[in-house]
Amino acid sequence: MKRSLGGLWDTWGITAILLLLLAVAPVLTPDFFSLDNAQSVLRESAYLGIVAAGMTFAIASGAFDLSVGGQLALCSVVSLMGFAAGGTVLAVAAALATGLACGLVNASLITRLAVPPFVATLGTLFVFRGVAYILTKDGPKTLPYDQIGSPFVKIGGLNVAGLPVPFLIMLAVYAAAWLLMRRTATGRRVLAYGSSPEAARFCGISPTRLRVFVFALVGVSVGIAALTYITRVWTADGSAQDGFELKVIAAVVLGGTSLKGGKGTLIGTFSAVLLVSVLNDMLVSEGVPSAYQRIVLGGVLIIALTIDGLRTRFAAPGSLRRAVTGLGGRTPKTGLAR
Amino acid sequence: MFRKGLLPLAVVGALVMAGCSDSNSPSDTPSKSGKVVVGFSVYDMQYEFFQKMEKGTREAAVAKGWEFKLHDEKSDENEMVTGAQALIDQGVDVLIISPFKPSALGPIIAKAKAKGVPVIVDDIGGGGAPYDAIVISDNAGGGKLAADYMAKQIVANGKTSKNVASITCEPSAVYAARRNAGFKEAIEKQGFKVVAELSGNSKAEEGYKVMKDIMAKNPDVAGVFSCNDPMGVAAANAVKDAGKNPVTDIVTVGFNADPEALTAIKAGGLAATVAQDPNAMGALTVKLADQALKKETITFGNAAEREVFNPVLLVTKDNVATIK
């Protein structure tokens, strides 16, 4: 398999930037690599990272799921209610079932009522949040302090071999997602459909089944993420993680997954999530005012995509000549790019 | 193909191994210099109230010769937990926190307890967690100040009616409810009767509507107390729209000393409000932090909830110019 420099950048570019940042981090923030801080960064990455894995599939299939913020709030609230009613087992089951149910609601709207994914999930974003608000109208749902010894509460704070449990869950999710995308027919179908829905249909891929699969997958990923989220924060209501969907999409795009679909890189997403967490941690511990923190994170996203855009223009065969002579030219889209 | 998975693993490995190499310097021992380090996690520095609280906390800490570390929760419970736990990781000796979500104090205090760091909560609420102390404004005392002023002003207005009204915040705001309770107790001692106690859910537009209803059902109402200023100013507007004066006809009192209330008081559009003093609250948390560090006994206003009350101040036309 021939590999161009551009192809390498697609998958590893953001990882390279992450390594660069990690190399300078101790200079800028002396206690960055303290055990506590490193664990905190990894623990903090988990809920964003897990949903970003699911979202990578959605975007690679050519669709957004804008409802993940509402899903996270609802999964968290229902899971906390489950814990109050039946302890750890019910809390875990409630989060996963709620995530799956949210995903199936999205899929039904998209496949049965033919609402475009963008609009359908924009609508359910408000609906899911609204339901979470109704469930918490008497105050946020909470893990009570006297349950501190319960296995559920421990998920968020525990370390195994120095690694926070939420991060180990995230690693497992990425391993499974990578196998699913790269080693199964389903994964190839998702990419093929994202690359060209028409061509995929001619090849016998059922758009309905594919949509149901992708949105259910996102929902389940949110359910898993909610477990790592609430066991760390201990509380949730309808307002939990406002704006979450955009953070997730930003991480996926930063990682190198194309918004046009057909191309998804889980390695890129994984590195992008860590990059955002590391950057965030450095900005906070350097005491950068919050307004500037937002600007830096936005700037990183824009710069990364600008580099990607330039790279795409120059890496395509003959593109240098076209760029120089100003003749322009479209980059052929590669359906099964890594 | 194995190569694909290696680099992220290397990244993780780097994070972890670098971490381990540093782990022999535990952060729970007091700082090397012997200087006390205090961490303050603030609700949101966008708001003037919390800017004043931060100033009061910082100045009191610096006056004690302490090192001061600030974290801004940015009105986000996730940031609150992450940042406050980071302060503990950085080895602060004591943590002061004005929590965006009191219900998210649990994981923070669990971590603080594990490292032997005392936690002083500033305002908002304690969320049932085992903090060392919580500073809140003397809400009941503020309600009493409002009642005593109102009783005097009604007499000065030459009114004979003994009927007054009380507008409450949303039922979940437990500390705010103490304002109306304190008001009711004090005004009834003066021989008045609270003929209506209704919720305006802390909102101006609902406060306006509630006040209109109160005046329609009780035309002789001589005073009204609102649990916050948006509702207080709105109630005053309802009084004015009914052709009456919110100082000399129906004595209208708010709570919080918001800028809009102070402006209204100067213009005679509101009788009084009650000022909280976030700056002094901040200074009080530092005093309590010092006591907690020295393991001294803290004197609580309400020992059951480990509450310490900070005094409030009545603001009328006479002293409004001196506020801020």
Image (cartoon, coloured by chain):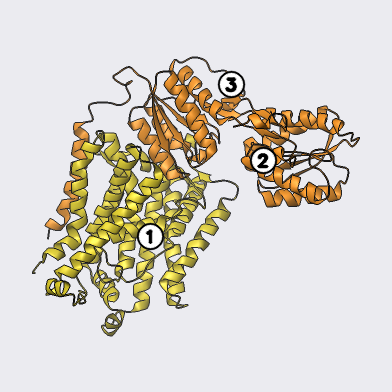
Chain colours: A yellow, B orange
* Residue at horizontal 50 percent and vertical 21 percent from the top: B288
Where residue B22 is drawn, which disc sits there? Answer: none
Where residue B300 is drawn, which disc sits there? Answer: 3
Q: Position of residue B15 (x, y in %)?
A: 21, 41
Side (left or right) of B66 relative to B261: left
Is circle 2 on the same chain as circle 1? no
Q: Nearer the viewer, residue A296 or B193?
A: A296
Using the image, determine if residue B71 lies above or below residue B120: below
Is circle 2 on the same chain as circle 3? yes
Q: Nearer the viewer, residue B105 or A284?
A: A284
- Name the front one of labels 2 and 3: 2
**Of the residues shown, which amino acid type is indicated by label 3?**
Phe
Residue behind mark 1: A220
Helix, strand or loop under label 1 = helix
* Residue at horizontal 46 percent and vertical 66 percent from the top: A122
State how far apart marks 2 and 1 are (Cα): 53 Å
Helix, strand or loop under label 3 = loop
Residue B218 shows in the view: yes
